[in-house]
Image (spheres, grey):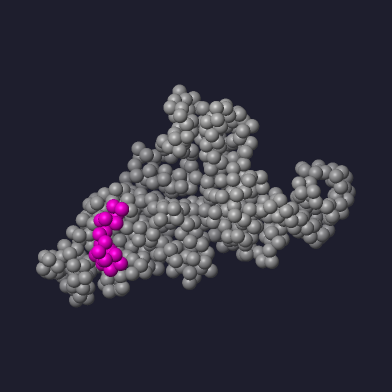
Amino acid sequence: MAGRDLRALFSTNDRGLTAVEAFTNRQMQWELVAAALADHLRQITEPGFDVEDLERPRHNVMVFHGVGGIGKTTLSRKLEAALAGADQRPAQWGEPSWSGERILPVRIDLARSAGTSFEDVVLTIRAALAELGRPLPAFDIALRRYWESQHPGESLEEYLRRGGLGARFGKAMPQQMQSALADIAQALLLPGTVGTAVGAVVGSLTKALRERRQTVRALAGCARLVDLLEAEADLEALSFYPHLLAWELAQLPADKRVMPVILLDTFEDVGDRTHRDLERLIQRVVWLLPNCFFVVTGRSRLQWADAALQGQLDYTGPTAWPGLALPAAVPAARAARPAHGHGRQVLVGDFSPEDCDDHLARRFTRGGEPLISEEIRQVITDRSHGLPLYLDLSVMRFLEIRRTGRTPQPADFDHDFPALIARTLSDLTADERHVLRSVALLDAFDLNLATAAAGLPHEAPALRLIERPFVRENVFGLWPYYLHGLIRSTVRGADDQADDRWSARDWEQAAQRALAALGEQFSARTGRDRMLLVGCLRQGLALARDFGLDLGWLAEAAWAYVPTRCGNRSPLPPGPTPTAV
């Protein structure tokens, strides 16, 4: 499945070139979503399911997280299209088991560049449900009251039109809200001219609900409606209105029933560890809509199952969000590490070499044949480490070289892209960026090594960094953490244009700190710890070679290695050899 690649189309005068946005594989992610949706549909149709139960654990969210440029936004868009209809679903994805159910996908881009506010999140969900063709009176009257309180004199219809929601979902939502208001006014026997006066209708409705009048029995079943109508109509109250939406969805007759699937993209822009105000509001939406399903895509896993967040968010801990919790057996020192594919938190992996080649072959074609040669595709694939962003940057470099009148050659793509650094550093703190550059000098590291190489007095930045998806983990390694191969080579080799970029002296000082930290671990070894000896030699000799450092402890380590090698006849690790000592 592919669309027009407009960026490429406007980068060349070659009208014979066919440029498409190739979408590659991701079948496993689709299978996980399909299975989770099937399970969710089963749960919400069970006889004991109650949308007004605010204490039941939530299983209505799935998270795809990964390094910037791995293809999360593309995946989110393709999931939206696939859920909208079978004709939009890639053939290899297959038919889901819930194909008979009505699914309504609603994708919301939370990126700062999109300027999406919390109001926009709520309005987008409601606007999408206008497709039902009927008012949702409990929610609609509360939302109308909020709007007139917070946006006096501003037409909701005009706001939707200006924000693009009117064009995206049509103009039915304001009409449905007005219809709900008029119906309630009529049921309360209010004068027709009062039908548009929200304050009068809300006041009369609240009184009628308190008195349990038969005229409003259709809304009397919503136990918390009166409380929400009596609360001050501010942003805090708006964040609880989705409870009314969940209740309305549960009242739909069988032939009108629909399950919204809300895709929240670029979730990393919602906030950070200190500022969780918007995240708290969005989490309420997820909690209060248990009959909807949410697919979250972002750079980091959701921390909602972490009990330590109690007080920052309303609903926290593994009991509240079983699918988002890490295994109980994970040691405390590693509790912050994302679990690959555990539960409902899935790390989006790199493309396989075959997928990379397929992606590049289909991006540009002429007469049905790939424009990028097999030799160039091989170089790009090898350099990319499977990162889709690198493939896209290489494709644009291919066009850039052609614009100069020269035929691209394989050697042109043995290249680092500073844009990768910008994407990687964009949401890191200053200390995290400092640690990242420091550990880029190392093949592998642990918390102590990362902190010492960065020269920081505390481990907190390193602890935060290892949560990032570009830091991988090998639980059987001497040092458990290592950087994504492409991120490491780019941070070390590309022309870093960041404001806090390092000078040559900065890199040398970091190398000295890293070498000294390795020496401390070598000196502290006990007995004949050959694995540590070999690991320290391998990393230490490489640092000494690359930065021209004094050998120091490496001389002693090399002499310690000689009898070990003679006794075990083990090969010398790759890199500089002890003869250099």
Residue projecting furthest to the front: 404
Asked if residue 177 lies left or right of residue 456, the reply is left
User: Which residue shows up at 35% across the image and 37% down it?
Assistant: 87
User: Which residue shows up at 39% across the image and 56% down it?
Assistant: 116
Asked if residue 12 lies left or right of residue 290, the reply is right
- Quadrant including the N terminus: top left
Judging depth in this view, the residue of 183 and 438 nearest the camera is 438
Task: Using the image, determine if residue 387 lies above or below residue 333.
Answer: above
Residue projecting furthest to the top: 367
User: Which residue shows up at 58% across the image and 60% down it?
Assistant: 429
Task: Using the image, determine if residue 11 lies above or below residue 424.
Answer: above
Judging depth in this view, the residue of 11 and 567 nearest the camera is 11
List x then y, in percent, for residue 487.
61, 47
Residue 459 visible from this viewpoint: yes
List x then y, in percent, for residue 414.
63, 36
Residue 334 visible from this viewpoint: no
List x then y, in percent, for residue 72.
48, 47
Q: Quadrant of residue 208?
A: bottom left
Residue 193 is a magenta residue: no
Q: Quadrant of residue 428?
A: bottom right
How many numbered marks, from 0 up? 0
The prevailing secondary structure element of the residues shown in magenta is helix
Judging depth in this view, the residue of 321 and 550 nearest the camera is 550
User: Which residue shows up at 33% across the image and 66% down it?
Assistant: 238
Judging depth in this view, the residue of 254 and 398 nearest the camera is 398
Asked if residue 481 lies left or right of residue 404, the reply is right
Residue interval drawn in magenta: 139-162
List x then y, in percent, for residue 130.
26, 53
